[in-house]
Amino acid sequence: GESVGLHLPTLSVQEGDNSIINCAYSNSASDYFIWYKQESGKGPQFIIDIRSNMDKRQGQRVTVLLNKTVKHLSLQIAATQPGDSAVYFCAENGYNFNKFYFGSGTKLNVKP
Amino acid sequence: NAGVMQNPRHLVRRRGQEARLRCSPMKGHSHVYWYRQLPEEGLKFMVYLQKENIIDESGMPKERFSAEFPKEGPSILRIQQVVRGDSAAYFCASSPQGHGELFFGEGSRLTVL
């Protein structure tokens, strides 16, 4: 199967600091990537996506960077807030564009 | 515009019983996906359906698990003769097309005693 892995299982940051969550993917055929946020007891929520023809995409307080050479994704959250505390997953569409493969997730703890 | 609706949110079954999980996709979405999540793990793809068709069931266990998405009504994930290892959160997602962003429901949490 496909492999989407994360470098850091848990990340603790101080409120107001910037957070960086990393993700490695294995399938060079993947052309679409999504970051999801999952709060405890809830379903994943879309944060931001990026296609393989882009290196960077910005949203509100979030930026996704894609490095296709080393098959690496990162999610940057500016001025992290307590409400950002959650588990973050990256997902790639792999070789089959009809389904997504998820990493194991990174838990972000924001300390007040 | 309601999101993806799943029910029940919590389901308790004894070993050997059947579990039925329902998913109503977002309005206008004809593509449904089921994922399974164990505690502290990521989501694992199970099955992808369109109305009346199973498109990809490569993530479904060969026995006891089945899924459908009838012309009318919600998609159903059915687990027969449940075992303790089936205890997990089952998430449904939908999309308007067979690619692009998936919209997830809040999940159904199955506990097998």
Image (cartoon, coloured by chain):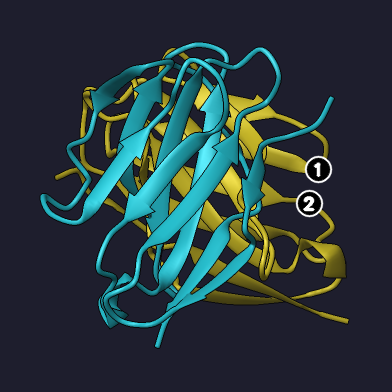
Chain colours: A yellow, B cyan
Q: Is residue A92 above or below residue B35?
A: above
Whether tag 2 and tag 1 are in contact, CB under 8 A, the answer is: yes
- Residue B16 on image: x %, y %: 27, 76
Residue in front for this viewpoint, A8 or B13: B13
Give the spatial CA distance, label 2 vs label 1. 5 Å
Q: Is residue B62 above or below residue A87?
A: above
Q: Which mark is residue A30?
A: none
Q: Residue at x 34, y 29 (%)?
A: B48
Q: Which mark is residue A78?
A: 2
Residue A45 seen in render? no
Q: Is residue B4 left or right of residue A103?
A: right
> In terms of image quadrants, where is residue B84?
bottom left
Q: Residue at x 36, y 20 (%)?
A: A31
Residue matched to label 1: A61
Q: Is residue A40 left or right of residue A100?
A: right
Give the residue furthest to the left.
B62
* Mark 1 surroundings: few (<14), some (14-19) or many (≥20) residues within 10 A: few
Q: Secondary structure at mark 2?
A: loop
Give the residue furthest to the bottom.
B113
Residue in front for this viewpoint, A103 or A99: A99
- Residue B93 on image: x %, y %: 53, 36
Question: How many tags in the picture?
Answer: 2
- Residue A18 on image: x %, y %: 74, 59
Q: Are dots 2 and 1 on a single chain?
A: yes
Three-letter code for the amino acid on which mark 1 is drawn: Arg
Three-letter code for the amino acid on which mark 2 is drawn: Ala
- Residue A64 on image: x %, y %: 59, 37
